[in-house]
Image (cartoon, grey):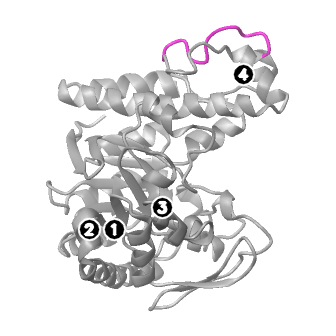
Amino acid sequence: MPRSGARAGSITTPHGVIHTPAFIPVGTKANVKGVLPSALTVLGAEAVLANTYHLYLRPGEKIVQDAGGLGKFMAWQGPTMTDSGGFQVFSLGAAFGKTISKFVKSDVANEGVVTVYDEDVASQHGQLAIIDDEGVSFTSHLDGSLHRFTPERSVEIQHALGADIFFAFDECTSPNELYDYQREAMERTHRWANRSLKAHQQNLSANKKQALFGIVQGGRYEDLRRESAKTIAALGFDGIGIGGSFSKEDMRDALAAAVNELPEALPRHFLGIGEPGDILEGIANGMDLFDCVAATRIGRHGSIYTNQGVIHLRNGKYRDDFSPLDPETVIPGTEQFTRAYVSHLVRAGETLGSIIASMHNVGFILNLVAGARQAILNGRFDNYRADFVRTYYG
């Protein structure tokens, strides 16, 4: 394993400090599924991220604004973040009905549009997203009604939601798009980044309280990632997000190409990354923030993270396994439950089983990243990562 560029730092927001590297649990609709906000604090979360698309459609940004902003609306005391909604809009269009993945295998590259799909927008309705240079027209997954997002509208909605950190509107592409379209989408993302930044700067009140991150695109192509990072970094954003999708094999090189062009002083967020090994890969490449729904999504289906890898508690062999969920990792609030008990709950369709598994998984990832931060401070991140990868992936 090559020597890393891992770094530890902090981001100060109006609602508290985020110590980096940090995992940000995803509260898509102003809730982290199956986990109370108070429990998130116990588990070690310092911030949460919600989704602009979903909150725009329901309950509407005006209701969140009238409640005092995202944090007060969901009774969360710490820093908050919102994404731009671009990922969900894309999943309604070209990628509708495909299996969700941040990655694809390299052997299926360049075979057309695949992969990105959000199970929260799956329905018989929202199967339309048309992108033009001004913005995106899309149908709601709730009722099929027609809506329009532009960079300015996305910023306006996110101003109303009131998160401490939010993202510029971008075009999220499939990793399997051909080079020419990746360049076209990247250049459109750059123009939208400029428009997002101008819209934010014109709102003096929001500009004082909220930080805006630009997003780097470019797919799997190192030259595009490098160009995009250089362009976005020069615009004057408060931080940088790395967006889009990769193949597993291309992630390290594409990420490194982007990071090499980013200023050391700006925070860097690796959007939608939650697989343990991928988080550590991102940290090794100098990324600071991560978010993903995977921890609660697999938890709802009865699967949990352990230091020995993911286990599926629906499997029969766990029916009489009275060991802790993960004997090597103590997660506050779930450490007293056995595999047999949670296996019984998920097999019986009891909601508590999904709650316990989701809490355990969120705690596991938070614990992993907190351990990585401490290892960086102690000068032993490379060893920490190698030890984890060896036991987790065998």
First reached walking from the N terminus: tag 1 or tag 2: 1
Please give the residue where the numbered disc 1 appears in the rendered image: 216
Q: Amino acid at mark 1?
A: Val
Q: Amino acid at mark 4?
A: Val
Picture quadrant of residue 218? bottom left
Spatial distance from mark 3 to mark 4, Cα to Cα? 34 Å
Q: Nearer the viewer, mark 4 or mark 1?
A: 4
Q: Are discs 4 and 1 less than 8 Å apart at CB?
A: no
First reached walking from the N terminus: tag 3 or tag 4: 3
Picture quadrant of residue 117? bottom right
Q: Are discs 3 and 4 less than 8 Å apart at CB?
A: no
Q: Amino acid at mark 2?
A: Ala
Q: Which residues are magenta?
A: 319-329
First reached walking from the N terminus: tag 2 or tag 4: 2
Numbered badge on residue 229: 2
Mark 3 element type: loop
Q: Residue at x 43, y 60 (%)?
A: 69
Q: Amino acid at mark 3?
A: Ser
First reached walking from the N terminus: tag 2 or tag 3: 2
Please give the residue where the numbered disc 4 appears in the rendered image: 342
Q: Nearer the viewer, mark 3 or mark 4?
A: 4
Q: Are discs 1 and 2 less than 8 Å apart at CB?
A: yes
Magenta span has 325?
A: yes
